[in-house]
Image: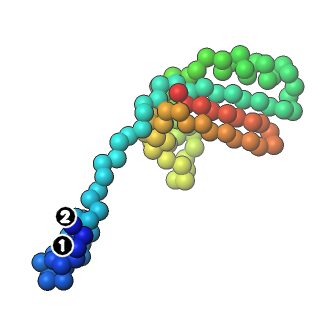
Amino acid sequence: MNQELILRKIETNELTAYEALKKLYPEKKVKPGRRAFFIKMNIKVPEEGKGVNTFLKILFIIPIPILFAKIGLRIANRFMRTDEVDFKEIAKMLKYSKNSVISIESDDAIIDIKIV
């Protein structure tokens, strides 16, 4: 509908403001993101030296399937009894977050997580 026509209908009380809003700005359907299948991790611990960093590179050289990540989240949910982190919601978001990159830098370690 034309904006002027909708405004006239509001003026003559044929439409409420809420109905006009719905006609002017219809809700768009939200498509879920692309489905992810693997998680690629890169962990560096600067204080530990070459041996530990090489072991971590070898350990995480193969991408981890999302299924194993979800199992890890369930285990973390059992051990971390907190209301601040919703592991079920994280698992849902993880499923449709292809091409996402998470970088964590702290004094102890540098962690890069790529979801592919």
Give the residue displayed 58% in from the left and 20% down from the top: 63
Q: Nearer the viewer, residue 19 or 89?
A: 19
Give the residue displayed 49% in from the left and 42% down from the top: 90
Which residue corresponds to mark 1?
Answer: 5
Q: Nearer the viewer, residue 22 or 77?
A: 22
In the image, residue 16 sits, relative to residue 34, either above or below, namely below
**Residue 78 in sight:** no
Left of 85 or right of it: where is 21?
Answer: left
Left of 92 or right of it: where is 111?
Answer: right
In the image, residue 85 sits, relative to residue 52, either above or below, namely below
Report how many numbered discs are placed on residues in the image: 2
Question: Which image quadrant is residue 59 in?
Answer: top right
Q: Nearer the viewer, residue 51 or 77?
A: 51
Which residue type does callout 2 highlight? Met
| Neighbour tally class for label 1: few under 14, some 14-19, many 20 plus, Cα within 10 Å | few
Q: Residue 64 in the image: state x and y as whole percent.
A: 56, 22
Q: Quadrant of the N terminus?
A: bottom left
Q: Are marks 2 and 1 in contact (CB under 8 Å)?
A: yes
Q: Residue 44 in the image: state x and y as whole percent.
A: 77, 30
